[in-house]
Amino acid sequence: MQSFKLPNNKTQYCSNGVKNIILITSFVCIIYLFFFNFNGPNTKLLHTSVSLQNDSTLLSDTNLEHIVFGIASNEKAWSTRKELVKMWWKAGSKMRGCVFLEKMPSNYTNNTTENDSLPPICISGDTSRFKYTFRGGTPSAIRVARVVTETVALNHSNVRWYVFGDDDTVFFPDNLVKTLSKYDHGLWYYIGSNSEHFLMNKAFSYEMAFGGAGIAISYPLAKVLGKVFDACIERYPHLFGSDARIYSCLAELGVGLTHEPGFHQLDVRGNMFGMLAAHTIRPLVSLHHMEMNDAIFPNMTKMKALEHLYDAAKFDPHRILQQTVCYDRWFTWTVSVSWGYAVQVFGYHVFLPDAQRVQESYFPWQKGDLARHYDLDTRPYEPDPCKRQLVYFLDNVSSGSDGIKTIYKKKTPENCTINMVSPRKLEEIRVTSQKLDLDKKQLLSPRRQCCDVLPSTSRNVMEIGIRECKEDELIYIHP
């Protein structure tokens, strides 16, 4: 059998082919390295990207020390409005910022005790060089707008956020920190909310953060805004307020509003119950116009009522005003718990979407037919107290090994008929819950919690337990 032998010329051809492949591969590698070194990514930018990912200041939790406040007031108002600021400014903490006045109050004293419970006073710069042409408005809007630049100019270190508000804006600091912590403070953020009033939003903008509700601006954006703000102000002499000037300048910088419904402008008057009892499932960040509305709890002064709410918030700040709805199967009652504030008991079944609507217990901010239009889901306020749902207001809060207990009682007298299935026989509502500690995922994608009507040892007492909902649990009227 004859063996097969590879011809010499074929062997030489294969050897040359291997050499050619090696040469081509080497040439490609050289070209790649040459291109990468001279045209590749900037090593400085690459270093910055890596350093940002490993920067401990970005990875660490945001806290109150990272926030600087700019509070707008005036010399006449400050003597009374400072009591509202005391409500939320944490004495002895490392909170930073200033309240800006046009001049030092005539009755100002170096009372160390009081001054420690308030932000320091800063005197605003002269704004007479700026034009103001809005008919019927006040030029002080320019001074208030410049609180932004003057707060940034304080040059505090280790700042992540600047927060601006009025002297009648009350903040809930723990919830403010929690809300801002879900955002990357290294990016440009302009955060706030609209008015509840349709006409206000239509007149100004749905993309404007209303100043009374509070405005949060991230550090890098605030630094840039501070550099260009005066030039922007000169282009907008025709605008009414300070917040409109801030919005217009940020629009020129190409930055839009990030809406956060926990900030509340509260452009309504009178009884705020409907607004507070149907609060969004986002943390409560701020309340405005509290001085101009009724006390939020019956039989209390406005300040005492607000203190009562803050006392509850100390026990569970993230849960304050959070609405939870459950149903009593035995009596076919609907129960709505607005934690730390009030419990409503309806003597009939109310679908969950209807229970979440804001009851129109308040009056319009302005007069006229359109003034009654709100950018909210609302339901009418029943004028007959015997046809309205029962409301039990917070009486006290306590904390123990089995959780946090809140007790709610009727605070207003009534003379209505009571039958065997009427909830009016109830004198007290007791609610048990665990402290709510929201993580970033829950803040970004919140879910309402569930509650149960528990067996009670007394016919005149209802007991409620609040808990996390099961994965596929629905809150609805059970047959």
Image (tube, rainbow, N blue to C red):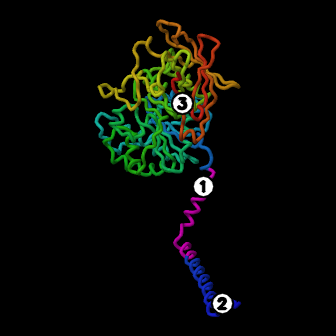
Residue 338, percent from left and from top = 53, 25
According to the picture, the residue beneath numbered tag 3 turns out to be 474
According to the picture, the residue beneath numbered tag 1 turns out to be 53
Magenta region, residue range: 32-56
Circles 2 and 1 in contact, beta carbons < 8 Å: no
Q: Is residue 241 above or below residue 60?
A: above
Main secondary structure of the magenta stretch: helix
Badge 1 element: helix
According to the picture, the residue beneath numbered tag 2 turns out to be 6
Please rate how many residues cluster around mark 1, counting C-alpha atoms within 10 Å: few if below 14, some from 14 to 19, many from 20: few
Measure the alpha-carbon separation of dots 2 and 1.
60 Å
Which is more toward the observer, 477 or 405? 477
- Between marks 1 and 3 in the image, the one whose residue lies nearer the viewer: 3
Relative to 310, 126 lies left or right: left
Snapshot quadrant of residue 448 = top right
Measure the alpha-carbon separation of dots 1 and 3.
40 Å
Report if residue 10 lies within the magenta region: no
Measure the alpha-carbon separation of dots 2 and 3.
80 Å
Identify which amino acid the numbered label 1 is placed on: Gln
Residue found farthest to the bottom: 8
Please rate how many residues cluster around mark 2, counting C-alpha atoms within 10 Å: few if below 14, some from 14 to 19, many from 20: few
Please rate how many residues cluster around mark 3, counting C-alpha atoms within 10 Å: few if below 14, some from 14 to 19, many from 20: few
Which is more toward the observer, 222 or 322? 322
Question: Which comes sooner in the sequence, label 2 or label 1?
Answer: 2
